[in-house]
Image (cartoon, rainbow, N blue to C red):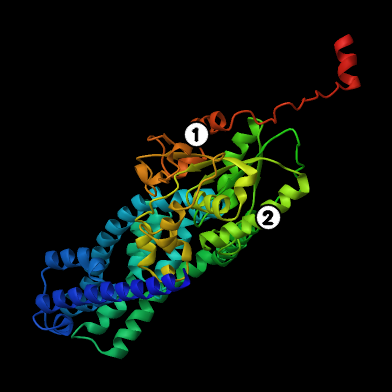
Amino acid sequence: MAYSFTRQLRLILLIEFLIFANIFALVAKFWRGFCGQDLTVCLTHFHFSANSFLLLSLIRPFLLTPLDVLAAMAGNTFGPYWGTFLTALGAVFSCTVIFGISRLVGKRFIRPWLAANLPMTFKFMQSQDWKLILATRFIPFFPYDLLSLLYGIFNFNWRYVIPLSFLASLPEIFIFAEIASPTTTVPGAVAKTLTVVCLFFLSPGVILEYISRKKGSGMWVRLKEMWSEFVFEVRMTNTVIRERTHDPKKIPVFLVYGFFSSRKTLTVLGHLLERRGYEVITFNLGGLFGVFSTTGIPESAESINAKLRRYIRNHDINQLNIIAHSKGGLVALWWLLQLGGHQYCNKLITLGTPFEGTYLTWLGLASPLGGLMRDMWQMRPGSDFLHALKTMAVPEHLRIYNLYSDNDSVARGERGIFKSVAYKQIQPIAMHHVYHEDFLKRRDVCDTLAYILGSPYIPGVQIKKSKPKVADKEKKAS
């Protein structure tokens, strides 16, 4: 498989290069057609109407053109002051579009992950949204459109995003508009810019920061607190609970989480199962920060193999059941079929596992992360790993239950069903009202799991009731 991975990596790098080369070629062609020759003509000799300039500002982010380029165009055409206002207004229009799109995308994909894996950090960021907007917009090193994208993903309040994006971008826009103005000189532009920045932005910012620090909530303090929250959550997520004592009367249920997730995502489902009498166990699969599952699927299976066998040996366990979400289903199945885990397990229940691969991996593979996360390659539709998994023999005693949904954006519909030659041992269960992350939260899903698992207690083992305390006896007697 190592050769296959190297070959696929070279292929995806070539595809990425061709994609970006074509995008930049199209952008360059647009500007040549729009300006007549090249972009420098628009910067020096081209003249716009206000309406056409605002329309150009609206589509600017999709042309991969920095905001400062349009600021220079506006300064040359409309002068520094009117040009600054029009550029900032057009930037707000484009910010609104990007913010709205990314907010919808974040609601469906990013925020559920944050709420499940880093809830404290996510909550803290939202409580400090206006401070983060003001600070990041005011620093010119952060790309304007990338910030608009992040504000939407993290669900910042639009009442802060729109006005603060307009106000905090004015100094940077004014610098380029002033420099590009045909009636100004470089020393004059620098002097005016410093005056505007000091009078209208630095001074109020310093005063607000001073007042905030007096109250113990300065921006720098808040940033350090946010980082501390993040580190604390990662460490807590990475902590394996060792105080739990094994109950020999119960059949353990082993939970496995999915791609780029942590043990924290299993919290709700674990509590629901424990209330129904099951003994729940989980282990870290390793990955980013030692917490977020990003390692290859066979490597993750090797990790749980060592930990599970030690747990089984220490507690003399003869049988356990497995519930696995998303990528975790592939990890669990590899452990069962390839590493001999089937001798300890009778039932595997998968929740939204992409047995046919998921097309979302192409989004990751089109980025630099694709070369670092081998599991993305393995979950790619038609990958060698998925093909090898289908050809493995399934032991006769092992039953595999696949919970799948048409509303699952990762493993949509029948892509969440393990289509093996041992089809008689595989039972698909449709739950089309459930989304991908909801498999780990909904009570009706837990009810279905409990029905499949059956009794949490080992047959034939008597459950002794604890004797009432002396105080209880006296209370009843009275």
Q: Which mark is residue 152?
A: none
Badge 2 density bin: few <14, some 14–19, many ≥20, Cα 10 Å: some
**Total numbered labels placed on residues in the image:** 2
Q: Which residue carries the number 1 mark?
A: 445
The quarter holding residue 215 reads bottom right
Label 2 or label 1, whichever lies nearer to me, is: 2
Residue sitting nearer the eye, 97 or 269: 269
Residue 324, given in percent of the width and then of the height, sits at 53, 46
- C-alpha span from label 2 to label 1: 27 Å
Residue sitting nearer the eye, 316 or 66: 316
The quarter holding residue 338 reads bottom right
Badge 1 element: helix
Q: Residue at x 41, y 56 (%)?
A: 387
Residue sitting nearer the eye, 27 or 58: 27
Name the amino acid, label 2: Lys
The answer to whether residue 240 is above or below residue 267 is below
Left or right of 97 in this view: 291: right
Q: Residue at x 72, y 47 (%)?
A: 312
User: Do the numbered discs 2 and 1 sit on residues whose CB atoms are within 8 Å?
Assistant: no
Which comes before the other along the chain, label 2 or label 1?
Answer: 2
Is there any visible trace of residue 229 in the rendered image? no
Badge 1 density bin: few <14, some 14–19, many ≥20, Cα 10 Å: some
Residue 165, given in percent of the width and then of the height, sits at 35, 62
Q: Which residue carries the number 2 mark?
A: 307
Left or right of 11 in this view: 425: right
Residue sitting nearer the eye, 26 or 328: 328
Residue 465, given in percent of the width and then of the height, sits at 80, 23
Is there any visible trace of residue 18 in the rendered image? yes
Badge 2 element: helix
Left or right of 121 in this view: 75: left
The quarter holding residue 225 reads bottom right
Residue 405, given in percent of the width and then of the height, sits at 38, 39
